[in-house]
Image (cartoon, coloured by chain):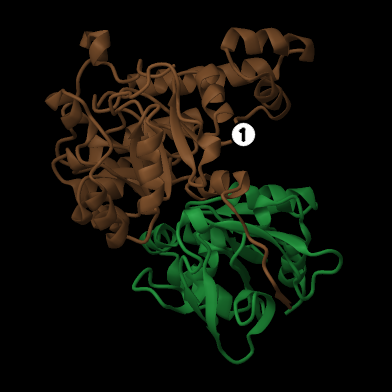
Amino acid sequence: MATEIKPNTGTWTVKSGLAQMLKGGVIMDVVTADQAKIAEDAGAVAVMALERVPSDIRADGGVARMSDPQMICEIIEAVTIPVMAKARIGHFVEAQILEALGTDYIDESEVLTPADENNHINKHEFSVPFVCGARDLGEALRRIGEGAAMIRTKGEAGSGNIVEAVRHARKVLGQISHIRGMESDELMATARDLKAPYELVKVIHQTGALPVVNFAAGGISTPADAALMMQIGVDGVFVGSGIFKSETPQIMANAIVKATTHYKDPEMLASVSKGLGASMPGIDVRTLPESEQFATRGW
Amino acid sequence: MAPIGVLAVQGDFLEHRNMLDSIGIESVEVRLPEQLENIDGLIIPGGESTTIVQLIDIYEMRQPLLEKARKGLAVWGTCAGMIVIAKHLKDKRPDPLGLMDIVVSRNAFGRQIDSFETDLDINGIDGPPMHAVFIRAPLVTEIGNGVEILAEVGHGKPVAVKQNRILATSFHPELTEDPRMHAMFANIAHSIQ
């Protein structure tokens, strides 16, 4: 049967649906088209195109902005998997530019220097879907309220240290199970305490889950880190500096993909963890002054 | 009756399992070759086709799966799954399994910004049209002998096709509330060959 299509683009279903397709996968930060191809060959479900990985942004200091559109276009040309790119928090014009380039997903990211310390982007106004970072359930629901179609933990990007990603994932999941067990007359006060939209708190109470896909990000640097986050209960992982700052990126990329698929299989995890060479150097997040913590950017 | 397997290396396999569950059909997750035993059918879900094919090869499932399909295992690919089971692709990658005699073009409707929803009439599905969600969706560009077109968008754009016990759809019935396509596949899978 032939149906004349009346296509409806940029809907919530297609925006949140793309994130559904990424589940169980690894999204890798890449800074060149060659790195993007390595990521695709290793089985990445998407790449994040950026000029510098977070550990270099951290080392360089200064203002970090949206990447050069030329570089993003080269990466879009180089691979057939979805290409994501970062806009500064609140910088809706960077987001408009990324949408015009044909970027498949925009990360409104604390890794870049915020453009607006008060407001995030109104993501409902875009056809392209957005992913945003969160440290707790209130922050996740505020971003979803603004139109984010996917959530990730903030973790502490470029630190090589998984501790903050674990903290944020456990916080979000713990708050969800707490709300799940509440009486319905407690939800308004909870929405007030979380500074979260009441309608979304009701959804959490009814379903026991975020209404969008939830990934881990910020500090994942080994296959074991990826599997840890999956066992804690996220849907997939972002790996930033962890792959291309390791000694053998190709092998590390492959190993993290396998660990994410077989996160419940210790024998598989043991076998992929062998002979990886040196991981990226890490830093103790507790030694970072607040001004150097990415996770505290945005609210 | 054996359960329906859902390939669970990557993608929205959980949504397929939930849909089967909603109509009382038992399912199991398939991640390794030995898990292809004792299933009546296999769903290859939406996801990233390059990733799914890489993982099928890394976990050495290609040959066992081809062997099973040759012996009559029912297989249904949705979106990325359609790409995975095609004979040829218009694109350089991935290297598809060749379970169905179709040529498929990836991302045929454009990038994510062109992803869309629409209502679709499908041969073999009674009642009102199905709501179909197309996300960076593929399209069938050529069909071989014995491939039946179940639905098209516009003219000459097949988005649901069937060949014997193999089914492929460009869209995602698992992202809707409508289990009719899953019931159709379960009927094929559980029918005597």
Q: Which chain is green?
A: B
What is the number of callouts on the image? 1
B192 displayed left or right of B54:
right
What is the quadrant of the N terminus of chain B in the image?
Answer: bottom right
Q: Which chain is brown?
A: A
Q: Nearer the viewer, residue A177 or A156?
A: A156
| Residue A279 percent across, percent down from the top left | 19, 34
| Residue A145 percent across, percent down from the top left | 58, 27
What residue is drawn where x is 76% and y is 70%?
A: B121
B42 displayed left or right of A263:
right
A211 displayed left or right of B102:
right
Q: Nearer the viewer, residue B67 or A214?
A: A214
In the rendered view, would you say B123 is above or below A232?
A: below
In the rendered view, would you say A86 is above or below B134?
A: above
| Residue A118 percent across, percent down from the top left | 43, 16
Task: State the residue lying farthest toward the front.
Answer: A93
Q: Secondary structure at mark 1?
A: loop
Circle 1 marks a residue in which chain? A
Which residue has dot 1 on it?
Answer: A211
Residue type at tag 1: Pro
Q: Nearer the viewer, residue B116 or A162?
A: B116
The answer to whether any part of residue A117 appears in the image is yes
Name which quarter of the figure residue A230 lies in. Answer: top left
Badge 1 crowding class, 10 Å Cα cut-off, few under 14, some 14 to 19, many 20 or more, is some
What residue is drawn where x is 38% and y is 24%?
A: A165
What residue is drawn where x is 60% and y is 92%?
A: B145
What is the quadrant of the C terminus of chain B in the image?
Answer: bottom right
Task: State the residue lying farthest toward the bottom.
Answer: B145
The answer to whether any part of residue B133 appears in the image is no
